């Protein structure tokens, strides 16, 4: 196992965790049906955008790309990935230290 393989796996896991975070946001809106009529108000004469709906493909939370278009999610996701990469790396290092301890090294 080389460094680039490990870095790639850490990055993939961090990205998955960030994507799961987006899924939690969507899930919140699905679970709380009273929020079904929540919309993003139009800016300077544009049309309002629903947060989440099964009937409109342009709803804000229908996919990450749409969410990124109207929010700063891309920046937040980048920060989450960086945070999760650090957490994943720290977890691996902790496990390696435990293995070294058990092996008496």
Image (cartoon, rainbow, N blue to C red):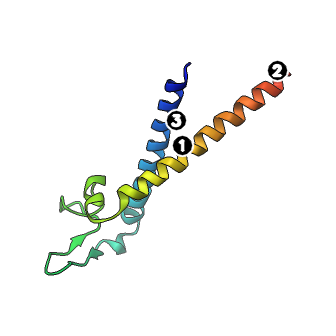
Is disc 3 in contact with disc 1, using a CB cutoff of under 8 Å?
yes
Asked which secondary structure carries label 1, the reply is: helix
Residue where numbered disc 2 is placed: 103
Q: Position of residue 100 (x, y in %)?
A: 78, 25
The residue carrying pointer 3 sits among few (fewer than 14), some (14 to 19) or many (20 or more) residues within 10 Å by Cα, namely: many
Q: Residue furthest bottom?
A: 44
Structural distance between the alpha carbons of marks 3 and 2: 25 Å
In-image side of 45 versus 70 (left or right): left
Q: Residue at x 75, y 31 (%)?
A: 97
Asked which secondary structure carries label 2, the reply is: helix
Instruction: Please name which of the two marks, 1 or 2, marks the residue nearer to the observer.
Output: 1
Q: Residue furthest front?
A: 3
Question: 43 or 49, which is in the foreground?
Answer: 43
Q: Position of residue 55 (x, y in %)?
A: 18, 62
Q: Is residue 29 above or below residue 46?
A: above
Residue where numbered disc 3 is placed: 10
Residue where numbered disc 1 is placed: 85
Q: Position of residue 91 (x, y in %)?
A: 65, 39
In-image side of 102 versus 91 (left or right): right
Asked which secondary structure carries label 3, the reply is: helix
Structural distance between the alpha carbons of marks 3 and 1: 6 Å
């Amino acid at each position: 196992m080389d460094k680039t393989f490990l870095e790639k796996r850490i990055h993939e896991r961090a990205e998955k965790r960030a994507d799961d975070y987006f899924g939690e946001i969507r899930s919140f809106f699905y679970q709380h049906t009273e929020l079904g009529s929540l919309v993003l108000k139009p800016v300077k004469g544009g049309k309002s955008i629903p947060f989440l709906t099964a009937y409109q493909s342009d709803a804000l939370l229908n996919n990450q790309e749409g969410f990124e278009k109207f929010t700063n999610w891309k920046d937040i996701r980048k920060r989450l990935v960086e945070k999760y990469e650090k957490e994943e790396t720290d977890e691996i290092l902790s496990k390696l230290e435990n293995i070294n301890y058990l092996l008496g090294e």
